Amino acid sequence: MRIITLIAAVTAWAAAAWAEPTAQIRKQTVHIDVISQSEYRMTEHTEVVIYKETMSQLANFYTTLDKSEKIERFACVVEGVNSKFNKKYKAGDLKYSEYSGDMVTDLKSVELSIDLPLYPIVVTTDVTYHRTDNTISYPPFLPIPAYDTEVKEATYMIDFPASMNLRYVAMDTDMKPVESTTPKGKKRRTFTLANQGEVVYEEFSKPLLQQIPKVLFVPERLDYYGTQGSMKSWEEFGLWINSLCQGMDVLPDDARAKVHELTDTCTTDWDKVRVLYNLLRRHTRYVSIQLGIGGYRPLAAEFVWRKGFGDCKALTNLMKAMLAEAGVASTYTLISTKYDRLIDLPNFQQLNHVILKVPTSKGVIWMECTNPEIPLGYTHDDIAGHEAVEISDKGGHRVILPDYADTLNLRTTKVKTVFRPDGTGSINIIDSYSCHRYTRLYGWLKKSEKDCINAAARAYSLPFGNIKRAVARMGYRKGEGGRGLLPLISASVEADQVQIATSTRARLFATINPLHSNFVPSHIARDRKHEIYIDQGFKNVEIIEMTLPEGCMLEATPKPVSITNEIGSFTSTVSVEGHTVKQTNTLILRRGTYPAAKAQLLDDLDSAADTVYKGKVILKRP
């Protein structure tokens, strides 16, 4: 699914009277002149001052163009603030490339990489773009390009014919446009942002794009590669997408025969879906298609069947056609893997993926056709809980996908340690992740044994040379209420001669849970500026058993801890049975958005865990 966006060069200048931020947009002026339904010209002037090397990327220019776009003018000047350094770049310095990670695309990249010799430095860029056809959206107003970047003044003007209905939505801002008329009789909307402070990165905050002011613009009417449609409502938007899919679901005779061979003996719709999903896994692979209208229209099912590849639209369309042949209805569905909610402005800047809704007797499956390795019935973390648009001959219908309860995103860690009198010991770990957390270990499945050992050394703070074995296995457990299979990955790690305890002549001091030796509380409440954003809640359960050396007398164990608040809970209990000390720790973190003032609640959970992880088992030597 193509998203039409403009990645423009960002430049700035700083006023001496201002306290120096990491970078500052002193002035940015964007002017878009809409010539017709399909044509516009954009001129942009930007001045940025860069104070630190960490923001040097703001000096670079990068954009992508399709065959309907070109750069008519480009100029860039780099100047030292406190020196006479001055260097100029022109259009001939831009580097064009048609190489892409996508196999089929008409996009080309344009870039200019600038090595900055000193700081602070000023980069001023002027560029003019011209789009002549197939306009589906206009460049958005995104005045803040990065964290730690102030904006002194940014202006966005868009002129358009009075007969044209141009729609917009302002997000994460209270900016209102100034409406006026140009000397040529066009309507003009002007947005201005001034004296905007920088967005500081903080742990547990929303992604930058969801924090910064932005305005999106779309034409109400569509005229795209010879097709016409409307984005007046999500319903009409869906009618256009549905029209692009018409006639693309015809299967060749051998595909139809294969479908019946596999499904005619199935007794349930679930079984039919399962065998066809396995066929999709064996028969196809994902290749991104971004060629002309192919950014929105799926390839024909017959083509995908013959060639064995396609993008999300094409593979979803093929699967839909195969299910229909088997008598199972399904719905072509557009969704975003980045945004969990859609705004009340139909547009393609939010939607970047296509999935399939398949109602069955066991419940609705939200099928990911680009990666059939995902367990059937599992709604993966890039789409779970997100709003989507179902497409049918009645148009577009918005729906919210289900998500899993926080406690189903479960990590269970079992650690067994055999402790020796010299302070070393052997450690056996079985670490399991399920639901949204299973991807944490997914990469291990394709690693060599040596690479798994190396990954285990980093993950569990163990000496590489002491790890004897590290492997990962994929498994599944049945979902609740017919939710299908939930993925589960377990890592098994064995290590020996690991230094577990420090010692004096009379005593040994052992950390009962060596996996958290590097744990550092986050202290997010210190000068917190942003609200707390927990995208996915989860539950951790740790069960640690330490077998004590013969002859040593147990003097002390870590104290139990229990804390519960609005954001989550942490409990730790310790029991002793014979020569075994057992500690059970349980952490629950609840998804949600919380005021910055409640950051202390998260710090309290951290502090409780820190107390437990620093706790010692104290033994008296014989």
Image: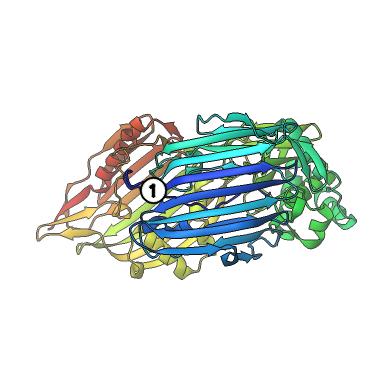
Query: What is the x, y in percent for residue 401?
Result: 62, 36
Q: In the figure, is residue 437 to the left or right of 478?
A: left
Query: What is the x, y in percent for residue 303?
Result: 82, 57
- Quarter of image, res 271: top right
In this orientation, which residue lies closer to the viewer: 536 or 345?
345
The correct choice, above or below, for 394 with respect to 272 in the image is above
Q: In the figure, is residue 350 to the left or right of 616?
A: right
Query: What is the x, y in percent for residue 174?
Result: 50, 29
The quadrant in which the C terminus is found is bottom left
In this orientation, which residue lies closer to the viewer: 26 or 241?
26
The extreme front residue here reads 183
The correct choice, above or below, for 457 with respect to 224 in the image is below
> Going 50% across and 49% down the picture, which residue do you hit?
46
The extreme right residue here reads 253
Residue holding disc 1: 14
In this orientation, which residue lies closer to the viewer: 205 or 52?
52
Note whether residue 568 is visible: yes
Note whether residue 366 is visible: no
Query: What is the x, y in percent for residue 125?
Result: 52, 54
| Label 1 crowd bin: few (<14), some (14–19), many (20+), radius 10 Å | many
Give the residue type at disc 1: Ala
In this orientation, which residue lies closer to the viewer: 70 or 144?
70
The correct choice, above or below, for 493 with respect to 520 in the image is below
